[in-house]
Image: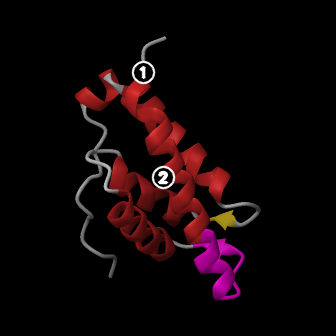
Protein backbone atom coordinates (compact mmCIF):
# COMPACT_ATOMS: atom_id res chain seq x y z
CA UNK A 1 0.00 0.00 0.00
CA UNK A 2 1.31 3.45 -0.91
CA UNK A 3 1.87 6.04 1.78
CA UNK A 4 -0.51 8.96 2.08
CA UNK A 5 -0.34 12.29 3.82
CA UNK A 6 -3.13 11.21 6.19
CA UNK A 7 -1.42 7.90 6.92
CA UNK A 8 1.87 9.61 7.72
CA UNK A 9 0.11 12.08 10.01
CA UNK A 10 -1.47 9.13 11.80
CA UNK A 11 1.98 7.59 12.25
CA UNK A 12 3.24 10.88 13.69
CA UNK A 13 0.41 10.95 16.22
CA UNK A 14 1.02 7.33 17.23
CA UNK A 15 4.75 7.96 17.68
CA UNK A 16 4.02 11.06 19.77
CA UNK A 17 1.67 8.99 21.93
CA UNK A 18 4.35 6.34 22.43
CA UNK A 19 6.52 9.01 24.00
CA UNK A 20 3.85 10.28 26.41
CA UNK A 21 3.67 7.18 28.62
CA UNK A 22 0.38 7.10 30.55
CA UNK A 23 -0.39 10.81 30.42
CA UNK A 24 -3.57 12.11 28.82
CA UNK A 25 -3.09 13.94 25.52
CA UNK A 26 -5.71 16.67 25.24
CA UNK A 27 -7.49 17.19 21.95
CA UNK A 28 -5.85 20.62 21.74
CA UNK A 29 -2.44 18.97 22.07
CA UNK A 30 -3.19 16.56 19.22
CA UNK A 31 -4.46 19.42 17.08
CA UNK A 32 -1.27 21.36 17.86
CA UNK A 33 0.75 18.49 16.40
CA UNK A 34 -1.42 18.62 13.32
CA UNK A 35 -0.96 22.39 13.10
CA UNK A 36 2.81 21.93 13.11
CA UNK A 37 3.20 18.93 10.84
CA UNK A 38 0.25 18.22 8.53
CA UNK A 39 1.08 20.84 5.92
CA UNK A 40 4.77 19.93 6.18
CA UNK A 41 4.01 16.47 4.79
CA UNK A 42 4.75 17.31 1.18
CA UNK A 43 4.41 15.05 -1.84
CA UNK A 44 8.19 14.60 -1.75
CA UNK A 45 8.09 13.41 1.86
CA UNK A 46 5.24 11.02 1.03
CA UNK A 47 7.29 9.59 -1.85
CA UNK A 48 10.42 9.22 0.30
CA UNK A 49 8.70 8.21 3.55
CA UNK A 50 10.59 4.90 3.69
CA UNK A 51 13.79 6.95 3.88
CA UNK A 52 12.54 9.53 6.44
CA UNK A 53 10.19 7.48 8.62
CA UNK A 54 12.56 6.08 11.27
CA UNK A 55 14.27 9.43 11.84
CA UNK A 56 11.07 11.47 11.96
CA UNK A 57 9.17 9.01 14.16
CA UNK A 58 12.01 8.94 16.71
CA UNK A 59 11.79 12.72 16.94
CA UNK A 60 8.03 12.57 17.35
CA UNK A 61 8.51 10.18 20.28
CA UNK A 62 11.01 12.65 21.71
CA UNK A 63 8.45 15.46 21.41
CA UNK A 64 5.94 13.25 23.22
CA UNK A 65 8.44 12.44 25.97
CA UNK A 66 9.43 16.06 26.45
CA UNK A 67 5.80 17.21 26.50
CA UNK A 68 5.08 14.52 29.10
CA UNK A 69 8.01 15.70 31.20
CA UNK A 70 6.68 19.24 31.05
CA UNK A 71 3.30 17.99 32.28
CA UNK A 72 4.84 16.01 35.13
CA UNK A 73 6.97 18.96 36.18
CA UNK A 74 3.81 21.03 36.61
CA UNK A 75 1.99 18.26 38.46
CA UNK A 76 -0.44 17.67 35.59
CA UNK A 77 -1.59 14.38 34.12
CA UNK A 78 -2.63 16.11 30.88
CA UNK A 79 -0.44 17.29 28.02
CA UNK A 80 -1.57 20.64 26.66
CA UNK A 81 -1.08 22.35 23.32
CA UNK A 82 1.43 24.73 24.88
CA UNK A 83 3.50 21.79 26.15
CA UNK A 84 3.51 20.32 22.64
CA UNK A 85 4.55 23.66 21.16
CA UNK A 86 7.44 24.07 23.60
CA UNK A 87 8.58 20.47 23.18
CA UNK A 88 8.47 20.65 19.38
CA UNK A 89 10.53 23.85 19.39
CA UNK A 90 13.26 22.19 21.44
CA UNK A 91 13.34 18.91 19.55
CA UNK A 92 13.36 20.58 16.14
CA UNK A 93 16.13 22.95 17.18
CA UNK A 94 18.36 20.15 18.43
CA UNK A 95 17.51 17.56 15.76
CA UNK A 96 18.72 19.58 12.77
CA UNK A 97 16.55 17.43 10.51
CA UNK A 98 16.36 19.15 7.11
CA UNK A 99 12.66 18.44 6.62
CA UNK A 100 11.51 20.08 9.86
CA UNK A 101 8.93 22.76 9.13
CA UNK A 102 9.33 26.30 10.34
CA UNK A 103 7.59 26.69 13.70
CA UNK A 104 4.13 28.18 13.52
CA UNK A 105 3.36 31.34 15.44
CA UNK A 106 3.13 30.69 19.19
CA UNK A 107 -0.23 30.03 20.75
CA UNK A 108 -1.88 32.98 22.39
Q: Say which residue label 1 marks.
A: 3
- The mark that comes first in sequence, 2 or 1, is 1
Of residues 105 and 49, which is closer to you in this image? 49
Residue interval drawn in magenta: 68-79
Could you tell me which residue is drawn at 61 percent across and 64 percent down? 65
Please tell me which residue is depicted at 24% across the width and 71% down the height of the picture. 105
**Vertical placement of 35 versus 81: above or below?**
above
Q: Which residue is mark 2?
A: 59
Q: Residue at x 40, y 70 (%)?
A: 90
Q: How is the image coloured?
A: secondary structure
Does the segment drawn in magenta span residue 73? yes
Residue extending farthest to the top is 1
Q: Helix or strand or loop: what does disc 2 sit on? A: helix
Whether residue 55 sits left or right of residue 35 in the image: it is right
User: In the image, is 7 to the left or to the right of 104?
Assistant: right
Residue found at the far right of this picture:
22
Give the camera-side residue of 67 and 25. 67
Amino acid sequence: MAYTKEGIMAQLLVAFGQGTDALHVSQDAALELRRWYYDAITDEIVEKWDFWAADVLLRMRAIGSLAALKAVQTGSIKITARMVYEAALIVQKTSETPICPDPPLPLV
